[in-house]
Amino acid sequence: MYDYPEFIQDIKKLTGIDLACYKERQMKRRIEALIKRNKLPGFKEFVAAIQKDSELYEAFLAYLTINVSEFYRNPEQWRVLENNMLPKLRSNAGNRPLKIWSAACSTGDEPYSLIMMLSKHFPLNKISVDATDIDKQILQKAQLGVYSEKSILNLPEEFKKKYFTKLGADSYKISDEIKKRVNFRQHNLLKDRYEKNYDLIVCRNVMIYFTEEAKDDIYRKFYEALNPNGILFVGSTEQMIHSDSIGFTSEYSFFYSK
């Protein structure tokens, strides 16, 4: 009988995404809901369907990724980043530009927030952020740069006024001068190569979906991707229990230095 373990193997061959690295009960429930929505009898038939239907294939990839994001999510943590972490990073970098990665960037709220925060301390032409996500469709949305009022609720008022244009009752477009400072590309945290020499890596609110083994592997790869004294900024529910065994030092809650 064809069941979820075989489905995992087939999806890995088709997409390169290893669903075994995600918490099974949560992910299986999401996929079963999608299968039911498409009126298919089971996992086997769903695999056959996404092989034939490119739109369903793309919709499936988009569905796998959980895109809940907002600008300046957890504002107090952004204050720690700006007031406590940024001076250290500037001191370490000297005269060269900071190298920053927003991993699993979702709809772009996070990398754009980084650019705006950095714009208070550096000329815009000296700032850039690498932003990656596994979901091609969500990256296209990020590059479009249009957001709801709710998305920018926590954003400092100075940034709203300076970098956003209101399009309608509930839509705001971010300025091109901010957009062009972000380098978006597709990347799978579980299998793709990690670039090196980052001063700051921001990866928030995605690790909670992975198994403990997958999380440990990703944290170790982040460690290798950072410069000495580089900083990893994680989400509010993602504090590392054994950060010292990897080589990280806990600086503040949710901030770890190499």
Image (cartoon, rainbow, N blue to C red):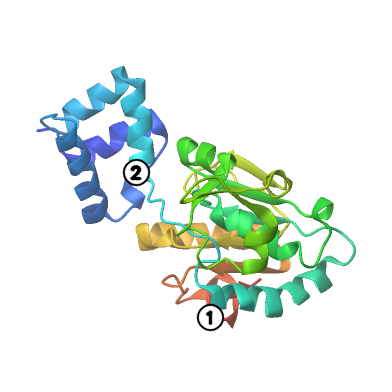
| Residue positioned 24% across, 55% down in the render | 26
Farthest residue, direction right: 95
Relative image position of residue 112 (x, y in whole percent): 63, 54
**Residue wearing tag 1:** 253
- Within 10 Å of disc 1 (Cα), the crowding (few <14, some 14-19, many 20+) is some
Relative image position of residue 246 (x, y in whole percent): 55, 70
In depth, the one of 145 and 21 nearer the eye is 145
In depth, the one of 111 and 2 nearer the eye is 111
State how far apart marks 1 and 2 are (Cα): 29 Å
Residue 116 visible from this viewpoint? yes
Tell me which amino acid carries mark 2.
Leu
Res. 10 image quadrant: top left
User: Relative to 157, is 12 above or below?
Assistant: above
Which quadrant holds the N terminus?
top left
Q: Which mark is residue 64?
A: 2
| Residue positioned 55% across, 66% down in the render | 72
| Residue positioned 74% across, 56% down in the render | 99
